[in-house]
Image (cartoon, rainbow, N blue to C red):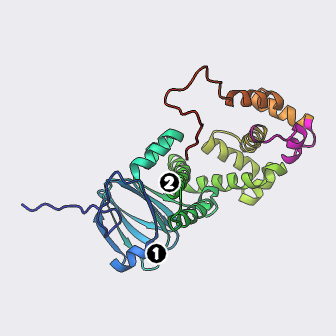
Amino acid sequence: MATRVIPNYALYGDQAAPGWQNSFDFEWIPQRSRPYNWEIRPHKHDAFIQILYLVQGQAEVLLDNAKFAVSAPCLLLIPAQTVHAFSFSDDMDGPVVTAAQRPLESLVGAAMPGLLPTIRKPAIITLDDSSGHAALLMPLFLSLEREAHLLSAGQVNAGMALVAAVCVQVARLAQVQQAARAHGNPRKAAQIEKFRAMVDARFKQHLPITAYAEQLGITPGQLSRLCREVLGMSSLDVINARLVHEAQRDLVYTSNSIQQLADSLGFADETYFGRFFRKHTGLSPRAFRLKALEDMLVPESTGPVPGNSASPTTSA
């Protein structure tokens, strides 16, 4: 009895590359799909993960044994060994990045182990144009395109780091989509994403909740209830958390005075900033800075480190 064999490709139509190869590739969907009349038959990549960003058009997508109808904008994440196929509309466009799965997992596992489940599971993620995370996608893909054509020292390392950054955005967007499903209302998740994007852009202005609510077309009470339902915190908590995060980052990574930081974050004076910061962290800004910097210090070695040469080196 004849058995059906799923073709194994590095990129569709190309001979499969060795599984150990540490590499990445960038293309635009029409480059590979148009020659096949926009029909990519079932196949798999034993060693490579693919991320497709559909920015225009529609498609029918096969992932293992399930078919899905999708419309742009959306993301498709296809880990190694996932059988997949596409039937694209002839106006389809968007970038595709292909990367060696194992090296990517090694990179992610060392720096962001919580990201591993995301890149090991096939996913279709619908996007909202107002999402701040979605807005960061195309610049990352365009940077990957430049690296793919650079052919210069460190190309693979830089490219894989950018792929990891794309995966971070994929994980964030997947989290938003999961929250929408959990609450049974994608519109609520879209509103939350829009609110958070607005906060990111304007948190230093200390706008009242009414200003954000008006832009969302809802009342302040509705906004706060929405935040509690989806995020587990009030709308004011969201804004304050963003301010605290920025203050902590500035305290650690800049040498600006507390007064300068207070000014840059929109506080009337250093005293008010100090009270706000202590209320939300339990520490004064100066105490937080000292503790954070102490925690970051590497203790001096009491003796030679085995395997190290006399001259220090850095690695990419």
Q: Where residue 155 sits in the image (x, y, percent)?
A: 52, 58
- Mark number displayed over residue 160: 2
Q: Where residue 306 sits in the image (x, y, percent)?
A: 50, 26
- Mark number displayed over residue 62: none
Mark 1: amino acid: Met
Element assignment for label 1: loop
Q: Residue at x 93, y 40 (%)?
A: 269
The answer to whether residue 262 is seen in the rendering is yes
Vertical position of residue 290 compared to residue 159: above or below = above
Of callouts 1 and 2, the N-terminal one:
1
Q: Is residue 49 left or right of residue 298?
A: left
Quadrant location of the N terminus?
Answer: bottom left
Span colored in magenta = 252-270
Binning the other alpha carbons within 10 Å of mark 2 as few (below 14), some (14 to 19) or many (20 upward) gives: many
Between 93 and 194, the one lying in front of the other is 93
Q: Is residue 311 left or right of residue 42?
A: right
Residue at numbered disc 1:
92
Q: Quadrant of residue 45?
A: bottom left
Between 185 and 110, the one lying in front of the other is 110
Q: Where residue 256 sits in the image (x, y, percent)?
A: 85, 41
